[in-house]
Image (spheres, rainbow, N blue to C red):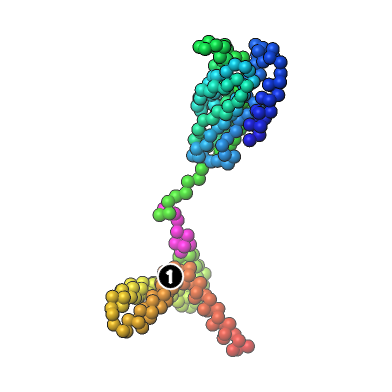
Amino acid sequence: MLPKLAGIFILSFLSFLPSTTLNAQVTSAGFVPSNIWYSSDTFEEGDKIQIHTFVFNPDARELSGTMSFYDSAILLGKKPFTVSPNSAEEVSIDWVVTAGEHKIFAKIEGAKFLVSKGNYETALLQESETVSLSRTVNKKIILKPEEESVNIVEEVEEKLTSTLDNITKVVEESTPSVISTPVKATLNTLEQARKSLATSSEQGKVAAKLKIQEVKASNESKSYVDKPFNYVKLFFLTIIAFFAKYSIAFYSLVLVILFYILRYLYRLVF
């Protein structure tokens, strides 16, 4: 918006200059100094935006030429333009943003005035190139599809299983067999119980779902009792299956239960 206002102000100022100045060999037509901007202030790699600039013509003749947009030495695109006498025009091109360091500027090439129909005169412009607009664009981070994303719970589960194995080895190596043997046996028993509970609860969930489907298809009066009962059963089996499936959830629950038991016994004794 500011470049446009600046262009209008300069155009208005130049319109009051003597005609001899406007018809001099070097004309003040061209860019408003530093006049280049993007259609969006914020963008990232892959976005399609526009690069804009603003050409004013305070001369009594029509100005035409080619607007070339550059990124350092790389040509981004060209667009022909024509600006009527004592007026201004906005010129823009589309740009698909790439990652890296950018130095964007525009340059007027082949500028000429229309002297008479079919006759042109080369225009020597005071402002034929904008000041460059620098911008650094970071590489866009592309998230992996959901099916390829890492399951955090399973990752923690693997680490916990590895930790439990290490604890078992440390207990066996650094403690007498009188202590290590029952500890190892207890851990093995808990792990077997967890796996068995996980299997049975999953089977129970399947059976409960089948029973719900049977009840829905049945018109018997007992279905009014069986239906909510099986929903409640499925709910509790789902919770049990979750805790039994993941070691981190199972052993956390065991520790919580053990804590409350020990606290209860402590209060009884003391």
Q: Which residues are magenta?
A: 148-157
Q: Of 92 and 132, which appears nearest the observer?
A: 92
Which element is circle 1 on?
helix
Does residue 40 appear in the picture of this structure? yes
Residue 101 relative to residue 178: left or right: right
Q: Residue at x 35, y 82 (%)?
A: 224
Residue 18 relative to residue 142: left or right: right
Does residue 233 appear in the picture of this structure? no
Residue 52 relative to residue 191: left or right: right
**Image vertical order of residue 142 relative to residue 161, above or below:** above
Q: Residues within 10 Å of mark 1 (few under 14, many from 20)?
A: some
Q: Quadrant of the N terminus?
A: top right
Q: Residue at x 63, y 21 (%)?
A: 86
Q: Of 166 and 73, which appears nearest the observer?
A: 73
Report the number of numbered marks.
1
The residue beneath circle 1 is: 242
Within the image, what quadrant is residue 232 found in?
bottom left
Q: Position of residue 223 (x, y in %)?
A: 32, 81
**Image vertical order of residue 134 relative to residue 42, above or below:** above
Q: Position of residue 88 (x, y in %)?
A: 60, 25
Instruction: Look at the magenta stretch and give its main secondary structure.
Output: helix
Q: Residue at x 33, y 73 (%)?
A: 209
User: Does the magenta segment cover residue 64?
Assistant: no
Within the image, what quadrant is residue 261 found in?
bottom right
Q: Residue at x 45, y 68 (%)?
A: 247
User: Does the magenta segment cover residue 151?
Assistant: yes
Q: Position of residue 71 (x, y in %)?
A: 55, 28
Tell me the amino acid under the disc marked 1: Phe
Q: Of 76 and 195, which appears nearest the observer?
A: 76
Q: Position of residue 108 (x, y in %)?
A: 57, 21
